Amino acid sequence: MPAIYSYAPAKAILFGEHAVVYGQPAIAIPIHELRTKVTIHALTQAAPGFDKVISPAIGLDAEITTLDAGNPIAKTVDLIKSHFGITALPACQIQIQSTIPVGCGLGSGAAVAVATLRALSSFLGHPLPDEEVNRYAFEVEKLHHKTPSGIDNTVITYGKPVFYEHGHDISFLKIIHPIDLVIANSGVKVRTSETVLQVQKNHEIDPITYSTYFRSIGDLSQQARSMLENGETGNLGDLMTENQSILSKMGLSTSKLDELIKIVLTNGATGAKLTGGGGGGFIIAMVDEQTKDNVYAALISAGATNVHKIRLEKQL
Ligand code: PMV
């Protein structure tokens, strides 16, 4: 039997992280330049239930039965087994390869879940529809984030820009003009569950201020949506920088993120912010055809890692 494989992209949040957990809208885009590939090899000589997972990026090479119940791969396999009403998978090896940096706010966990759900369901002869993939990937996200908004699994499952509000129907964004962006890693890994908890505590201590922050961020997402859908994106960078200043007041930026943002702004980006949970991870900068190479080069010479030029293509 030939190997079965599936891909899933990375993602970046353009507007609205954290506020989205409190019911505000957010905008996320897939990053097709970075992706996870999951390959399933049938182990024809082994008995059903002998399933292995190999993920060199995180040094994992194990039998699935030896993983903790809280392991995302073990959870994904359990979800697949219960969906198909089977007690064991045919013997197989699940191989995970990824160019998405782990634990940096680019959705690596959701990408692994989505690609694994697709690959395993295809391996069983019944590829899951997107709605099921999204629903199950959300269950796996709960292991990573505890109280995920669902934005990561949604944008990664559908591979299209989304305007996301928890509990609402998914709304895909129209993009009238392609958008150029640059992303770079601050080099610090953070668990999103930690920054989400930090925001939750601060919100409990000062609900009035934090509710105002969340609403202001939600307004920025709404404004950004109109700009993208009307093709009037001239001020989109300013909205990004405004979003960053609120995230910074919420204590989610770091000196390294601030330094990278300053570099991109002084080298031609029209706006920039952290993307994802914050406290480390990536920045995202709004650039154009003329400025993207300059911004990219400035980040490289400042020693930033995982610097990528991203193009958000027209989407009608
Ligand atoms: O996985 P990350 O780091 O991109 O964070 C997702 C964005 C948050 O709003 C911080 C959490 C969530 O569940 O939406």
Image (cartoon, rainbow, N blue to C red):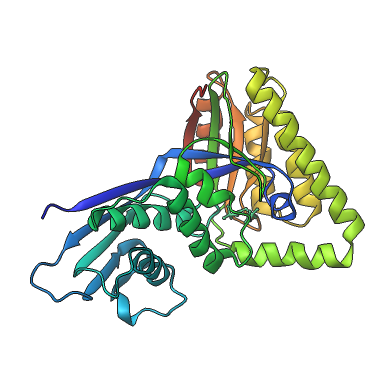
Q: 309 or 207, which is in the foreground?
A: 207
User: At x 38% / y 63%, what residue is drawn?
Assistant: 83
The answer to whether residue 149 is left or right of residue 62 is: right
Q: Is residue 165 above or below residue 110?
A: above
Q: Position of residue 186 (x, y in %)?
A: 57, 51
Residue 254 image-quadrant placement:
bottom right
Q: 306 or 297, which is in the foreground?
A: 306
User: At x 48% / y 41%, what residue is drawn?
Assistant: 307
User: At x 54% / y 35%, what residue is drawn?
Assistant: 161
Residue 106 visible: no
| Tag count | 0
Q: Position of residue 115 (x, y in %)?
A: 36, 52
Work out which residue is located at the far right of the displayed protein and give it: 208
Residue 162 image-quadrant placement:
top right
Q: Quadrant of ligand 1?
A: bottom right
The answer to whether residue 155 is left or right of residue 15 is: left
Name the quarter where the N terminus is drawn.
bottom left
Q: Position of residue 209 (x, y in %)?
A: 89, 54
Q: 124 or 231, which is in the foreground?
A: 124
Residue 198 visible: yes
User: At x 57% / y 19%, what residue is drawn?
Assistant: 176
Work out which residue is located at the far front of the displayed protein and give it: 85
Q: Is residue 292 above or below residue 29?
A: above
